[in-house]
Image: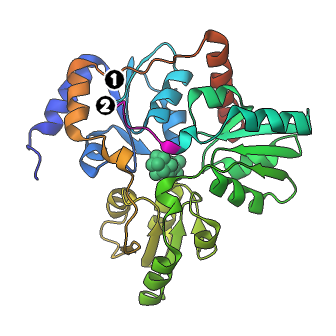
């Protein structure tokens, strides 16, 4: 349904009244992206949050994104329009895995945690990474053994790019990318043999083996926008299509998805209604539940990512 024409002006006034800035991930509904001040991938959103003058950050995304903004900006109010929107992968690692690796490798071990992780998980780790900087950071870490958590798919991809490191995987995965079917990808490739395949590293190894380009949501969008090719098979959550179309307007480019287009039910929960009511009421405030010491360690893990990725 069409949104009221006056909505953007109304939202702009709410933002001003609250001294708030709205950051959105490429996977949230298009109408929410349109009302945001900035839209980006996980790394961009984490980095950007530190540079903004407003006292309130509204994070239109899933819980770990709001938590990362809060960890990096403890003095600010961070609001999640839908606090129940969580990333299931953020929880897919146990403390036992960390302890076992530390025992086995001692000092020559770094624990790299994907930003898609809880604050508690971040507090156990040495450095945070996102899909846009994981390869760079893992290759620069001084240790030769790296326990990569929680995502086995991104971990395996990093291992393929950084063969000089011993990368230990953990069995976590993104339920949305994990189920992207190879046979559906092959079908769409056969239907469009001249299309390039752009895939997110959360996909399985067999899907990534078919890709012409592997990168974060921003990386995929940038690649398609600047490529001289005109057809692309996009192998990630469908939400990126909005920015792909915006960035390539007038370029005559075509985008295809697998027959079962991947969606993220958690990101889909972040609706315009919830964004508006969070701006009106100030609901959904992110509070980090951990004690001071664990919170400081989690924040350090993120700070190290910003340093390494700079
Ligand atoms: P990006 O950092 O590539 O935006 O990925 C976030 C995410 O949740 C992918 O599923
Ligand atoms: Fe988490 Fe997957 Fe959704 Fe990304 S797409 S937020 S990894 S469930």
Looking at the rendered image, the quarter that the C terminus falls into is top right
* Left or right for 258, reference 135: left
Marks 2 and 1: in contact by CB < 8 Å? yes
Residues under labels 1 and 2: Cα distance? 6 Å
Q: How is the image coloured?
A: rainbow
Which quadrant holds residue 113?
A: top right
Q: Which residues are magenta?
A: 82-88
Can residue 310 be seen in the rendering of this structure?
Answer: no
Q: Position of residue 103 (x, y in %)?
A: 88, 33
Q: Was residue 143 drawn as part of the magenta stretch in this picture?
A: no
Q: Which residue in the structure is indicated by mark 1?
A: 284
Q: Main secondary structure of the magenta part?
A: loop
Q: Position of residue 201 (x, y in %)?
A: 59, 59
* Left or right for 166, reference 92: right
Q: Was residue 87 drawn as part of the magenta stretch in this picture?
A: yes
Which quadrant holds residue 202?
A: bottom right
Per the image, label 2 sits on a secondary structure element best described as loop
- Residue at the front extreme, as displayed: 96
Vertically, is 255 above or below 306? below
**Which numbered disc covers residue 34?**
none
Can residue 298 be seen in the rendering of this structure?
Answer: yes
Residue shown at the point (24%, 33%) measured from the top left? 274
Per the image, label 1 sits on a secondary structure element best described as loop
Q: Which residue in the structure is indicated by mark 2?
A: 81
């Amino acid at each position: 349904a069409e949104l009221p024409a006056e909505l953007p002006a109304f939202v702009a006034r709410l933002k001003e009244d609250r001294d708030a800035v709205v950051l959105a991930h490429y996977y949230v509904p298009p109408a929410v992206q349109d009302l945001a001040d900035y839209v980006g991938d996980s790394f961009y959103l984490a980095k950007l949050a530190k540079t903004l003058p407003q006292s309130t950050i509204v994070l239109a995304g899933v819980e770990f994104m709001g938590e990362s903004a809060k960890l990096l900006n403890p003095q600010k109010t961070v609001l999640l329009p839908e606090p129940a929107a969580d990333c299931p992968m953020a929880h897919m690692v146990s403390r036992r895995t960390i302890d076992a690796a530390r025992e086995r490798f001692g000092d020559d071990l770094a624990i790299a945690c994907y930003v898609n992780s809880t604050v508690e998980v971040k507090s156990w780790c040495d450095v945070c990474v996102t899909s846009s900087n994981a390869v760079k950071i893992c290759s620069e870490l001084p240790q030769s053994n790296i326990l990569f958590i929680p995502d086995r798919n991104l971990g395996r991809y990093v291992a393929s790019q950084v063969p000089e490191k011993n990368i230990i995987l953990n069995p976590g995965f993104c339920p949305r990318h994990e189920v992207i079917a190879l046979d559906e990808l092959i079908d769409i490739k056969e239907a469009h043999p001249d299309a390039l395949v752009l895939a997110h590293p959360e996909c399985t190894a067999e899907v990534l083996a078919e890709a012409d380009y592997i990168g974060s949501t921003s990386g995929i969008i940038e690649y398609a926008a600047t490529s001289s090719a005109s057809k692309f098979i996009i192998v990630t959550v469908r939400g990126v299509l909005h920015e792909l179309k915006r960035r390539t307007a007038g370029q005559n480019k075509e985008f295809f998805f697998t027959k079962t287009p991947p969606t993220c039910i958690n990101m889909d929960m972040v609706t315009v209604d919830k964004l508006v009511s969070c701006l009106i009421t100030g609901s959904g405030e992110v509070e980090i539940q951990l004690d001071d010491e664990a919170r400081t360690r989690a924040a350090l893990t993120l700070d190290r990512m910003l340093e390494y990725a700079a």
